[in-house]
Amino acid sequence: MQLLNCFAKSLKSWQKKYSVTGQVPLMVGIFTLGLIAYNSNLIQASEYKQQVKGQRIKLTLAVHSGEKDAWDDLARMLEEKHKNIDLVIKEEQYDFKTAAQGSDIIYTDIIWLPEFVNNKVVQPIDNQMIRKFGVNNVNEFITKKGFLKSEIEHGKYPPTADTRLYRIPFRTDAGLLYYRQDLLTEYGKSVPKTYGELIATANDIMSREKQKRPGRRFYGYLWQGLGEGSTTMFLEVLHGYGGFWIKDWEKDNAKKVGLQHKEGIDAIKFLRETLKKKISIGDSVSEDITDDFFIKGDAVFLRSWANVWARSKSSESSVSGKIGFTAMVGKTSATKTSCQGGWGLAISRKLPKDKLDAAITAIDFLTSYQSQKEFTLRQGTLPTRQLLFTDTAIIGKYPHYPKLLGIINQYVVSRPRTLKYDDLSKILQNTLTSALDLTKDDETVRKIMWQGGHLTRNCLDEKKTTCITQGSLVKP
């Protein structure tokens, strides 16, 4: 208050002195700047007093099992730099429901955001970011931070002109086709570029490996047929044939769904052929099972996520130094694909307003270059800042990361951003389970795909609050 009184007395003095010369506006401007500086000092002083009194702002964040130690380290780094923040990391069996409950900062899967926004679980943070970091708009903030564009887009909702930013990306992921380079070399084979080459190469090497060791359980090409793994797997195959699942930006429901089109039926036929030739393990296996088979040396090819590379270097692995990877091949060499995964940080709508600035500070720190670098080196995950893919320390441990960046920037395909995603994915999974049944003939499979498209269109109807995720066949 003493400083304010001083400014007021000075202004009166200047008014008397300069009233004739017309310089009062200049003095008012100087006075205004002084007030701004004073206000800034008040904020800093308030934060300082809060630290001195030991009144730290407590924030909570729930994370996956297996990640807690790495997150605890990041929390300690945050608290050392921002001494007024206390970040408590909770380890949980993480899923959609637990993510939406209890935490101040929410660790969200790339596909959860639309439902979180619709159910008012998270709050928009674009205005806070603009204000806190002194940028003119969100795009300037994104450019300044150097995030992958594809990741930032999945932090926005809805995918329209009036979109808002809710989520800052922390780690990304990419679907990959892994191959046994040692076996390709041994049998004089090249890395496949098309679906036809993939089946032929997988079948040939599998047959010859089984001849060497009769009775061995060995597969040519492994893919996932269970849960969300089947959705991401099929999305790649479908796009590889030039098709699509759901166009979330399309307003006409009749044009929005592509399961029933020729490309969708061709994609199912490809997967059915891998089952008929017995080069694949089956249509109801999870990522854990397929990854384990490959890591133990019992398969030539595997479709999975980027973390398999780190697992291949572990003590449990029989394929260390023997594998390579590429984007998932397609119908032609020009139609490679890689399904996008990823996790980011959002702020709960239940967060008290007096904690909001601290939460923004925490998210900015946790998604920073250094934080992502520490987490990547420890966990073998993929960062969301482009420059980290060529960071000296990271490529020293993971020399394949520049190649991964190329795949992400060139071949990534995304799952639809829609608030009914969970139901839509279940429709697709049920459709795949039925269509991959080898007792069904081609005409029945065609009808199953048509039915899947029909259920999907109905689910997308905004007038309907619930979705039927499976149903009896009707004539197309």
Image (cartoon, helix red, strand yellow):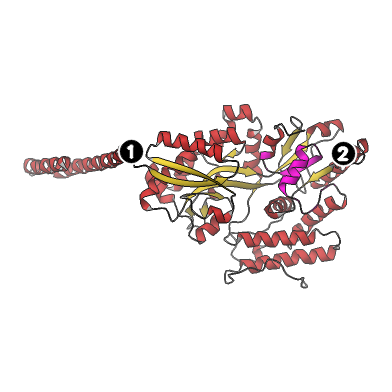
- In the image, what residue type sits under mark 2? Ile
- Per the image, label 1 sits on a secondary structure element best described as helix
Image coords of residue 226 (percent x, y):
72, 54
- Per the image, label 2 sits on a secondary structure element best described as helix
Task: Check contact, mark 1 vs mark 2: CB within 8 A.
Answer: no
Q: Is residue 312 visible?
A: yes
- In the image, what residue type sits under mark 1? Gln
> Which residue carries the number 1 mark?
51
Residue 326, picture quadrant: top right
Query: Which quadrant of the figure contains the N terminus?
Result: top left
Magenta stretch: includes residue 360:
no
Residue situated in front as seen by the camera: 291 or 175: 291
Q: Give, as a single range, the part of the protein colored magenta.
A: 279-307
Q: Is residue 385 visible?
A: no
Numbered tag placed on residue 416 in the rendering: none
Image coords of residue 78 (percent x, y):
44, 37
Magenta stretch: includes residue 297:
yes
Circle 2 Cα neighbour tier, 10 Å, few/some/many (<14 / 14–19 / ≥20): many
Image coords of residue 354 (percent x, y):
35, 50
**Residue displayed at 55% across by 37% down:** 69
Residue situated in front as seen by the camera: 120 or 155: 120
The answer to whether 265 appears left or right of 206 in the picture is: left
Decide: is 96 above or below 327. Answer: below
Circle 1 Cα neighbour tier, 10 Å, few/some/many (<14 / 14–19 / ≥20): some
Considering only order in the chain, which callout, 2 or 1, is on the residue closer to the N terminus? 1
**Rounded to the nearest whole Å, what is the CA distance between mark 1 and mark 2?**
65 Å
Numbered tag placed on residue 205 in the rendering: 2
Decide: is 466 above or below 6. Answer: below
Badge nearest the viewer, 1 or 2 = 1
Image coords of residue 380 (percent x, y):
62, 36
